[in-house]
Image (tube, rainbow, N blue to C red):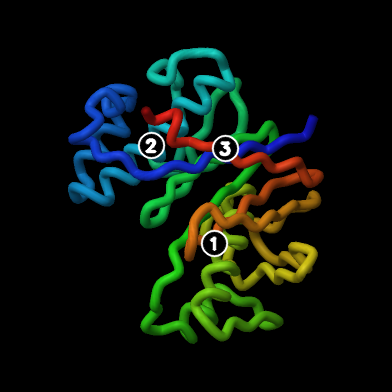
Amino acid sequence: MNVCTIWWAAPVSPADSPQLVDLLDAHERERLNRLQPDADQARYLAAHVLTRRVLGLWMDRPAASVVIDRPCICGKPHGKPTLDGGPEFSLTHASNVVGVAVHDQPVGLDVERVRPLPDLPSLAKFACSCRETVTDTTQFFRLWTRKEALLKATGAGLSSPMSAITLGRQGVCSWTGPGAPTEPVWLVDLAPSTRHPAAAAGLGPLPVVHEEDGDALLR
């Protein structure tokens, strides 16, 4: 069955959950320690432990034994996270929401918090194609999550411009230039929390999308 499962959770403070910090690998602990305390660390810890717990369940192995690779052309481990022999996955976090999507095909997940933007016209010009317009921040962040999820799914990241993608009511109307996929893509809007638009996207036929309680996996 073609299913994409998404787990949502709240951030978790490292000071309150040292047993979760123990599940991280050396790279993740280094990144965690470089972040500012409190909110940033709590989001990072929850996102990466949730990812490990979810993948561990999927592969029937302990979370700490899951080996996540982060290949990058520069040779350092800060590329798109991948799992040898496992499912495709994508993680995201914003404010008090953390999410992980898992699918057997390439998948992307993004969540944002709607907030004031001092220069909405400039940001809209960056994110919108010539056929799109946004008039307020709620519209902008909905469009952003959709396009960010699509770019995560293809692995192109922001090296492929958001303005090359034109969205419509049925999903992607057109996608041009470098990084544009040659196969069909799917796109689903989500809303894990008030004022937090989110989107999941992937390659291939539209799956059944299930949303699950990730907080239970962080206890």
Mark 3 vs 1: CB contact within 8 A: no
Viewer-nearest of labels 3 and 1?
A: 3
Residue 204 vs residue 107: left or right? Answer: right
* Mark identifier at residue 197: 1
For mark 3, does the 10 Å Cα neighbourhood hold few (<14), some (14 to 19), or many (20 or more) residues? some
Question: Where, quadrant-wise, is the C terminus in this rendering?
Answer: top left
Give the amino acid type for the residue marked by disc 3 in the picture: Glu
CA separation in Å, label 3 and label 2:
29 Å
Viewer-nearest of labels 1 and 2?
A: 1
Viewer-nearest of labels 3 and 2?
A: 3
* Mark identifier at residue 77: 2
| Picture layout, residue 191 above or below residue 84 | below
Question: Where, quadrant-wise, is the N terminus in this rendering?
Answer: top right
* Residue 75 picture location, percent across and down: 39, 38
Give the amino acid type for the residue marked by disc 1 in the picture: Pro
* Residue 171 picture location, percent across and down: 75, 62
| Picture layout, residue 98 above or below residue 22 | below
* Mark identifier at residue 212: 3
Identity of the residue drawn at 37% across and 52% down: 96
Secondary structure category for the residue under label 2: loop
